[in-house]
Image (cartoon, rainbow, N blue to C red):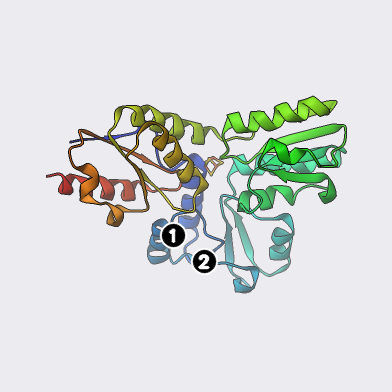
């Protein structure tokens, strides 16, 4: 059986940058998991003594606090600043962009629509930047727009990991009822690149392995794209979850990995598959 990696996979620019920042600050704590990958978080803990504070109360005075790629709500950042902590901001620049857009458009009197998951840390952060919180709305479907008390002028942004076609549905719906719709395409290209490459490979492969955190929306989306083209598509966090029967009678095994998956995990998976099909 041949094993082939997607032409684009794994760590995106924002995650690489956040990990480098953390590695440069040995002994720091991250506020929330730095990325959605437990194995990489363990590596940072064991190799660089990087701790994890799940809530503000877990942060001690004089801690060096690394802000994760998804960013954090504005008021939490303020609270951290009043504590005697050193703040190192590893928020991905592609996430700070929608934060700034929301702040600006809200201050200019626009209703702000944010297309995303309200429970996602990135979205909790982005919405917190609205100057007028009562005029900022998080939606996941165009149907949810129906009952919102939106002004005639609306600005719309998207969670970085969402699909453009789904974002377009929200925009189209807004166009039907609002006089002015300012659309900011805040979807991240890194997501498209990995997705397109995974789809191309899944069309050819008879088994697809997608490696990444089970809570990572980016990895879950990669998996669902692969399932569209390849029935035998599996999502795993690391090589321990591989099952030998997945590869029985297969000719081409495709591999893709989410934006929070380090290369060393991808290599471990490939080695384990090679052993299994020997
Ligand atoms: Fe940033 Fe895009 Fe990665 S938003 S964290 S470069 S997936």
Q: Are marks 1 and 2 in contact (CB under 8 Å)?
A: yes
234, above or below 83, in the image = above
Quadrant housing the N terminus: top left
Residue visible at 81% across and 34% down in the picture = 154
181, above or below 240, in the image = above
- Displayed quadrant of residue 186: top right
User: Residue 256 location, x and y as percent?
Assistant: 36, 39
- Displayed quadrant of residue 233: top left
Residue visible at 61% across and 33% down in the picture = 166
The tag on residue 267 is none
The tag on residue 52 is 2
Q: Residues within 10 Å of mark 2 (few under 14, many from 20)?
A: some
Q: Secondary structure at mark 1?
A: helix
- Mark 1: C-beta under 8 Å from nearest atom of ligand 1: no
Quadrant observed for ligand 1 in the rendered image: top right
Residue visible at 76% across and 38% down in the picture = 145
- Residue at numbered disc 1: 41
User: Residue 79 location, x and y as percent?
Assistant: 72, 65
């Amino acid at each position: 059986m041949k094993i082939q990696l997607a032409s684009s996979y794994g760590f995106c620019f924002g995650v690489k940058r956040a990990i480098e920042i953390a590695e440069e600050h040995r002994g720091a704590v991250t506020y929330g998991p730095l990325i959605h990958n437990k194995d990489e978080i363990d590596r940072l803990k064991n190799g660089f003594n990087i701790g994890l504070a799940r809530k503000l109360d877990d942060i001690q005075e004089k801690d060096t606090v690394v802000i994760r790629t998804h960013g954090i709500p504005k008021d939490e950042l303020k609270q951290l600043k009043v504590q005697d902590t050193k703040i190192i901001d590893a928020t991905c620049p592609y996430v700070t962009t929608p934060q700034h857009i929301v702040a600006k458009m809200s201050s200019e009197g626009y209703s702000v629509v944010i297309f995303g998951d309200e429970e996602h840390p990135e979205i909790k952060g982005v919405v917190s930047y609205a100057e007028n919180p009562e005029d900022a709305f998080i939606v996941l479907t165009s149907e949810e727009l129906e009952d919102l008390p939106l002004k005639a002028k609306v600005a719309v942004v998207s969670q970085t990991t969402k699909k453009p076609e789904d974002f377009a549905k929200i925009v189209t719906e807004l166009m039907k009822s609002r006089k002015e719709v300012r659309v900011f395409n805040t979807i991240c290209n890194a997501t498209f690149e990995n997705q397109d490459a995974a789809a191309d490979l899944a069309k050819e492969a008879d088994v697809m392995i997608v490696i990444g955190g089970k809570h990572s929306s980016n990895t879950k989306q990669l998996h669902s794209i692969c399932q569209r083209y390849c029935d035998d598509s599996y999502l795993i966090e690391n090589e321990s979850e591989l099952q030998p029967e997945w590869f029985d009678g297969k000719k081409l095994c495709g591999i893709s990995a989410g934006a929070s998956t380090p290369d060393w995990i991808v290599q471990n998976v490939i080695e384990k598959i090679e052993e299994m099909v020997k």
